[in-house]
Structures are given as C-alpha cells and as structure tokens.
Amino acid sequence: MRTLPWRALSAAMALFTVLPIAAVAIALLIAPVLAGWLFVLIVATALGLMLAVQIGLMAALLFVATRNEITLRGGTMHLKGGEFHERVPLDTVVAATVVQARSSDGLKGLKWRNGITLPGFRVGWYQRGRGRFVFVLASHASPLLHVVTNNRFDVLLGVDDPAALAERLLANRPEDRD
C-alpha cells in the first residue's frame, strides 16, 4: 500500500523547484549575451514561481497543522489537532472545570514534550513539572476546559463554550455513546 505518490511528488519538486533554479543558473551563465530586460524577466519569473509555490505550501501546512476537531461518539471523546490524535473514554472523565489560561490549572507551568506551539495555538503533549501529562488542544488563550481523567493523562481544551462541553462530558448521555 502506498501512502505518498512519489512520482507525482518528485515531478512537482522538479517542476517548481529544480526547473526555476536551473533557469536562473542558465540565465546567469549566458547573461553577457542576453539583453538586460530578458535576463531580469527570466530571473524574476523563476524566483516568483518558486516564491508563489512556497507561500502556497506554507499556507497548506499551517491549515493542516492548526485544524482542530473534538467529537463525542461511541462513548469516547475524539481529539484531533494537526497530526496529533487522542481518544478519551467518557467513563474515565472524573472532572471538567473551566480555567483561565494564565492560572496554575491552565497553560502556566506546562513543559513542552511533543507538540506544536505557535502564538495563540498549542496542540500536543505537555507535562506539569515532573507530574501528570496533559494533552493540550487550544487555539485561543482563555478560557480553557481542564478535563481530569483517571486515565494516564489529563486534557486541556480551548473551545468556544467550555461550560457546555464540561456539562456534556460529565453527563455522559446515551446520544454520546451511540
């Protein structure tokens, strides 16, 4: 089973990276015989193509890396943020409280272990001092939902309505269990 189309990827790399660099190198070699405007046109077009592709790739990367999803189904809370996915059985939820990001129950004092940290965005694994691991999925600073579990980790979520999600997690309703 192939997960990446290697031929398409290598063709795209050749077309959008190697070919413009080759065009610039050739233009530099034959610059003495080219008209000034033609030399500038070749170099500007090649570099513009590379820049446009790089901007597009960065936008796609940031979109994928910062896309968050929280789903309740089958008695489980499914957390997806970038490349990080975690499942929390609703039966393991002990408490769910709304906290401020700057409080001791929030983002303050968390040590990064494996994740993505950008301004205004955190996803991945963090640890409280030498204590318990915390799976963080927060795209804005405050308020956050701190979900304590009797599992091997806790969860810290940045959602639009943390109080409503806390109530729903603690209720463990039949519609959340399918």
Image (cartoon, rainbow, N blue to C red):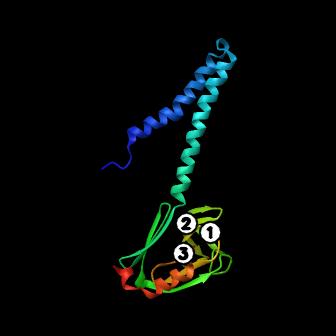
Q: Tag 1's secondary structure?
A: loop
Question: What kind of residue is marked 3?
Answer: Val
Q: Which residue in the protein does label 2 denote?
A: 123
Q: Residue at x 64, y 14 (%)?
A: 34
Mark 3 to mark 1 CA distance (whole Å): 17 Å
Q: Position of residue 107 (x, y in %)?
A: 63, 74
Q: Residue at x 62, y 15 (%)?
A: 30
3 or 1: tag closer to the N-terminus: 3
Which numbered mark, 2 or 3, is in the foreground of this view? 2
Which numbered mark, 1 or 2, is in the foreground of this view? 1
Question: What kind of residue is marked 1?
Answer: His
Mark 2 to mark 3 CA distance (whole Å): 10 Å
Rendered position, 96 above or below 59: below
Q: Which residue in the protein does label 1 denote?
A: 140
Q: Tag 2's secondary structure?
A: strand
Locate the C terminus by quadrant: bottom left
Category of crowding for the residue at label 1, using alpha-carbon neighbours closer than 10 angstroms: few (below 14), some (14–19), many (at least 20): some
2 or 3: tag closer to the N-terminus: 2
Q: Is residue 71 visible?
A: yes
Q: Residue furthest top?
A: 33
Mark 1 to mark 2 CA distance (whole Å): 11 Å
Q: Which residue in the protein does label 3 denote?
A: 134
Question: What kind of residue is marked 2?
Answer: Val
Rendered position, 13 above or below 91: above
Q: How many marks?
A: 3
Q: Position of residue 76 (x, y in %)?
A: 40, 77
Q: Position of residue 164 (x, y in %)?
A: 53, 82
